[in-house]
Amino acid sequence: MSKIHILSSAKCPKCGGMMDISDNQEYAFQCEHCDEDFYTIEVREAILGLPLVKYPCQEVDYYIADKAEFSAIMGKYGVVGYWIENLGNGGMLGMTWPDFFPESESLQSLFEELDKLLPRRGKDKNEEEMAFEYKVRIPSLDTVIYMQDGDGSQLSEDDYNDGFNDYVDYEILSGKNAGDGGIYMYTNEGVSRWTDKIPEVISYALDIQGECPEYEIEKT
Ligand SMILES: [Zn+2]
């Protein structure tokens, strides 16, 4: 089970990979690949598009924007744009800044304050509830496909330039093409939950033209 990270658009100064917000309060970002932490100041040259952070929360709260405490936090940390997405098992609060990420200490205290209003996913939940994955069964084809919400780490700068900003990871577990797998990229604008993409992933993975066959989903 992979850990639930706070994703960012900051790129690792060493390997160029996408970084998460660091678990180490002293730093801002961490590169899982290099196993190294960085301060905000160290990533100034390495960023993909807008400074962006995706904070995974346990519940979707579309009314959060109306709460004075919430606007106060957004103002205090200079967040100019934010949105809430429903991911099926919880929510995701996206936040952007006009110029650059806040410095490390400030970025960390933003999440500390947010945690009180919109508890972070993975903090109190058990592993099963944290799961962002399903087994998708297609009875008519006697096929099962494992699918997982992409965490952003597999998209390249070219993919973003092509307009993709999200993806589903899949692996065909049984049936004709068992063992095949890959990622299905999409643009998440207007997509409220990643599971809405399941029919497209099925068609893509199994190379089905026309309508997607009936399917059932189950938690893994
Ligand atoms: Zn790295």
Image (cartoon, rainbow, N blue to C red):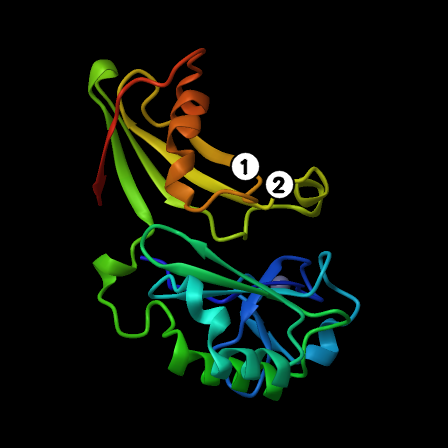
- Quarter holding the C terminus? top left
Label located before the other in sequence (1 or 2): 2
Amino acid type, residue under disc 1 in the picture: Met
| Labels 1 and 2 touching (C-beta < 8 A) | yes
Q: Residue at x 50, y 34 (%)?
A: 184
Look at the numbered disc 2 and give the secondary structure of its residue.
loop
Q: Which sits in the foreground, 54 or 80?
A: 80
User: Residue 78, percent across and down?
Assistant: 67, 79
Respond yes or no on whether mark 2 lies under 8 Å from ligand 1: no
- Quarter holding the N terminus? bottom left
Say few, some or many: other residues with alpha carbon within 10 Å of mark 2 (under 14 / 14 to 19 / 20 or more).
some
User: Residue 206, percent across and down?
Assistant: 39, 19
Q: Which residue in the structure is indicated by mark 1?
A: 185
Q: Which residue in the structure is indicated by mark 2?
A: 164
Amino acid type, residue under disc 2 in the picture: Phe
Residue 115 left/right relative to 93: left
User: Residue 156, percent across and down?
Assistant: 65, 46
User: Residue 104, percent across and down?
Assistant: 63, 83
Q: Is residue 147 above or below residue 214?
A: below
Q: Is residue 169 above or below residue 36?
A: above
Q: Is residue 210 above or below residue 155?
A: above
Figure quadrant, ligand 1: bottom right
Say few, some or many: other residues with alpha carbon within 10 Å of mark 1 (under 14 / 14 to 19 / 20 or more).
many
Q: Residue at x 46, y 77 (%)?
A: 67
Number of numbered discs on residues: 2
